[in-house]
Image (cartoon, helix red, strand yellow):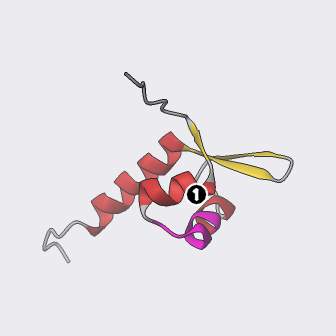
Amino acid sequence: METELRTEWLSYRDAEKLASLSRTTLWRLASVGELKVARVGRAVRINRRSLEEYLERTADNTSPSGDC
């Protein structure tokens, strides 16, 4: 039985799969401080929690409520 490892820090490729966002979009979000990132040399890792929180915030803002 294989145990799935849930990493707290994601590569761009893993973040793309998780969020269904492009690398360019993830890079822009990281640049403006929407996502927490860690840089080690040239490697960049995106914090899973900050990505999930960003997605929750944007889902709350785009849900149809009829309150325009």
Q: What's under tag 1, amino acid-wise?
A: Arg
Is residue 24 on the magenta stretch? yes
Q: Nearer the viewer, residue 54 or 6?
A: 6
Which of the 4 quarters of the picture holds residue 19? bottom left
Residue lying at the far left of the rendered structure? 66
Q: Position of residue 40 (x, y in %)?
A: 81, 43
The quadrant of the rendering that contains the C terminus is bottom left
Q: Visible in this render: residue 51?
A: yes
Q: Secondary structure at mark 1?
A: helix
Which residue does the numbered mark 1 point to in the structure image?
13
Is residue 18 on the magenta stretch? no
Which of the 4 quarters of the picture holds residue 12? bottom right
Q: Is 16 located above or below residue 7 in the figure? A: below
Q: Is 15 located above or below residue 8 in the figure? A: below
Q: Visible in this render: residue 34?
A: no
At 48% from the left and 32% from the top, the residue drawn is 6
Q: Position of residue 2 (x, y in %)?
A: 41, 25
Q: Crowding near pointer 1: few (<14 within 10 Å), some, many (20+)?
A: few
